[in-house]
Amino acid sequence: MRKMAAGNWKMNGALSDLTELTLLAQRHAMASVDILMCLPAPLIAPAQKEGVIKIGGQTCHVASSGAHTGDISAQMLVEVGAKAIIVGHSERRQDHNEDNATVQAQARQVIEAGAQAIICIGETGDARERGETLDVLADQLAGSVPEGATSGNTVIAYEPVWAIGTGVVPTLEQIEEAHRFIRNTLVDRFGSDAQDMTLLYGGSVKGSNAAEIFSVADVNGALVGGASLRADDFSPIITALEAS
Ligand code: 13P
């Protein structure tokens, strides 16, 4: 099982902010966990010098090339250095109407391009209030995770939509229930290899809550938004994961 501390800069950051990655690479040169930073596409190539830190993208098109003005393929991101690509983030599902079929096609592109697919799933606050959390997760796992997914080419990120950017974190029991359900569902479908699939929790993870979140069974790391932008904020999350 590979533990992973992953950051998602979303639509933030400039060339000058890559110094944050230099700092992280210096502080964690001997890291015992995978460190991944998913950057806006224009920053991927310039970030390649950052040693121990793997660089990733945040989305890709469902096709490998073609007449799709403004879009970027997984192959293109991999060519400039992306080792992993997030697909199915709730902000993409919401802002760009990306459904499970789209996410699955994107994940296939990522895997075919030779990178790791970080597939995001998670319920809305309304769905949780209606008691539909596990139904939503089952539906998203069945629809978004492609055949051929393995512990090597796929990571699942559980990101409850209501916890993203809100400072509201689920209880440890809620995180445990979701992660146990995800693990069991993956093992039912993919067999024992899915025991080794890395499962990330995402949603308002900070240095101050990382250790308790990493103590939860079947949480193998985090996908971090706001607290990934500055080395001083992300560094304690890496340290907590290493200690878990
Ligand atoms: P925050 O850590 O800012 O809540 O964002 C989580 C997220 O969406 C990571 O993909």
Image (spheres, rainbow, N blue to C red):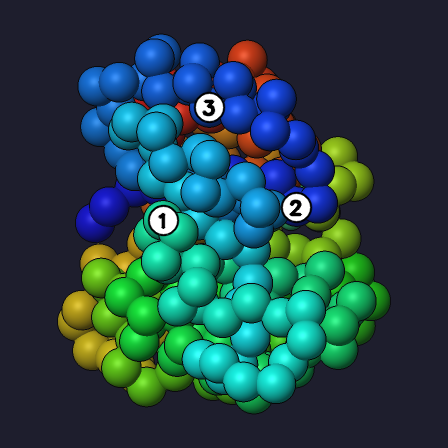
Whole-angstrom CA distance, mark 3 to mark 1, is 15 Å
Image position, residue 186 (x, y; %): 34, 74
Q: Is residue 183 above or below residue 43?
A: below
Q: Earlier in the sequence, mark 3 or mark 1?
A: 3
Residues marked 3 and 1 touching at CB (< 8 Å): no
**Given the image, on which type of amino acid does mark 2 rest?**
Lys
Q: Is mark 2 within 8 Å of ligand 1?
A: yes
Q: Would you call the spot at circle 3 few (<14 residues within 10 Å), some (14-19), or many (20 or more)?
A: many
* In this rendering, position of residue 85 left or right of residue 203: left
Identify the residue position indicated by label 1 in the image: 81
Q: State the image quarter where residue 226 is shown.
A: top right
Viewer-proximal residue among 71 and 126: 71
Q: Is residue 98 above or below residue 235?
A: below
- Residue plotted at (39% across, 68% down): 75
Residues marked 1 and 2 touching at CB (< 8 Å): no
Q: Is residue 244 above or below residue 19?
A: below
* In this rendering, position of residue 59 left or right of residue 128: left
